[in-house]
Amino acid sequence: MKEKIKVLTITPDKRDLKSIQDVHDKYVPDTYLCFKARNEKEAVKVINETNPQIIVIELLKAKMDGIALLETVKQLCPQAKVFIYSFDDDQDTIDKFKEKGAYKYYIIPLLIETYFHDLYVALNLE
């Protein structure tokens, strides 16, 4: 059996954590192993324990410093592809995240097909 791809989702909202996992379970249940973190401290612990290939940071509520969090996760797991979800459509903000190592920056709402396509490209699964 092929090893599952590890995906860490970081968001302070419990419902968002569940919905991201539900999307992976619904569309590709045998492909991904999902992990969750609600803050930077939990994220550091999960990264050290699992070494995920994909990290999703949801910045839907202003409870986290996204840039600082991105820098931390890239320092701990530099090979991980980091996807940012946000309502912030300011181009300077988007550029800042990409400069710091974000693989993709999505402005909400996002089509699930777009996410999975980008995920496959990031993992060279196409």
Image: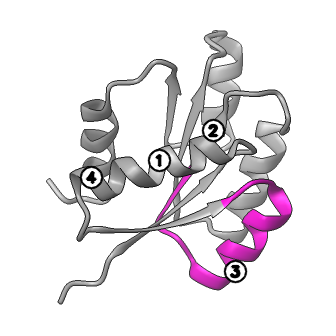
Rendering quarter of residue 35: bottom right
Observer-nearest of 58 and 117: 58
N-term-proximal mark, 3 vs 2 = 3
Q: Amino acid at mark 3?
A: Asn
Badge 4 is on which residue?
Answer: 26
User: On the rendered image, what quadrant is the N terminus found in?
Assistant: bottom left
Is label 4 in a helix, a strand or a loop?
A: helix
Q: CA distance from mark 1 to mark 3?
A: 21 Å
Badge 2 is on which residue?
Answer: 58
Q: Is residue 101 visible?
A: no
In this picture, residue 16 sits left or right of residue 114: right
Picture layout, residue 110 above or below residue 97: above
Observer-nearest of 8 and 25: 25
Picture layout, residue 51 above or below residue 73: below
Q: Amino acid at mark 1?
A: Ile
Q: CA distance from mark 1 to mark 4?
A: 10 Å
Q: CA distance from mark 2 to mark 1?
A: 10 Å
N-term-proximal mark, 1 vs 4 = 1
Badge 3 is on which residue?
Answer: 48
Badge 1 is on which residue?
Answer: 20
Q: CA distance from mark 3 to mark 2?
A: 20 Å
Asked whether the residues under the numbered discs 2 and 1 touch, taking CB atoms below 8 Å apart as contact, a structural biologist would say yes
Asked whether the residues under the numbered discs 3 and 4 touch, taking CB atoms below 8 Å apart as contact, a structural biologist would say no
Magenta residues? 37-56
The nearer-to-camera label among 3 and 4 is 4
Is label 1 in a helix, a strand or a loop?
A: helix
Q: Amino acid at mark 2?
A: Glu
Q: CA distance from mark 3 to mark 4?
A: 27 Å
